[in-house]
Amino acid sequence: GGIALHDFSGRLGEQRVHFHAMRLQDSLFLWVGAAPALASLAVAMCSPRDSIPVAASLLGDPSDTASASLARRLGRCGGGARGAGSSWAHSIFCLALTTLFCVLASKTKKQIFVSYNLQNTDSSFTLLIENRIKEEMLAFPEKF
């Protein structure tokens, strides 16, 4: 119950990246960035009609899908993990999906708000971002 705040960081490639997670009763807010800014914000939530989360950009350039993509992956709905051959894994919102991360993220089943504030949206870099989040989720599941 209540609100849980969790801050962590890591050196990913040549860049220091900071993360701020705020777990609320039925949702999770995740901020990712190198400097204090809120340039983008997206939300993803489960749909009663589909196992694919619905995602929308709330703030920032709507053509920048990094926040929506990460929110969608973290907001994974029901069912098990999908393999790389599924249409969801190949959607425009997916950058670098891993089966293990998908399994872990499916446990949240929450409305997810994501603010991705980094210039680098390369798929190999976003995979590093996901892996760092995954490490924290495994180490501190009560914070997510």
Image (tube, rainbow, N blue to C red):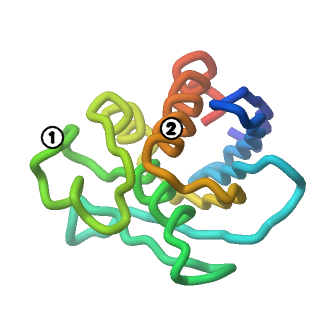
Q: Quadrant of residue 7?
A: top right
Camera-side residue: 78 or 11? Answer: 11
Horizontal arrangement in the rendering, residue 126 relative to residue 72 (left or right):
right
Question: Does any portion of residue 87 appear in the rendered image?
Answer: yes
The amino acid type of the residue labelled 2 equals Glu
The amino acid type of the residue labelled 1 equals Gly
The mark that comes first in sequence, 2 or 1, is: 1
Task: Report the residue at 72% width, 27% height from top.
Answer: 10
Q: Position of residue 48 (x, y in %)?
A: 27, 68
Q: Decide: marks 2, 1 in contact (CB < 8 A)?
A: no
| Image quarter in which the N terminus is found | top right
Residue that extends furthest to the right in the rendered view of this protein: 36
Horizontal arrangement in the rendering, residue 54 relative to residue 5 (left or right):
left
Q: Position of residue 47 (x, y in %)?
A: 32, 69
Dot 1 falls on a residue whose secondary structure is loop
| Image quarter in which the C terminus is found | top right
Task: Report the residue at 40% width, 51% height from top.
Answer: 73
Q: Quadrant of residue 2?
A: top right
Q: Which mark is residue 3?
A: none
Residue that extends furthest to the front in the rendered view of this protein: 14
Task: Kindly identify which residue carries mark 1.
Answer: 83
Task: Kindly identify which residue carries mark 2.
Answer: 130
Dot 2 falls on a residue whose secondary structure is helix
Give the vertical position of 144 relative to 136 (above or below).
Answer: below
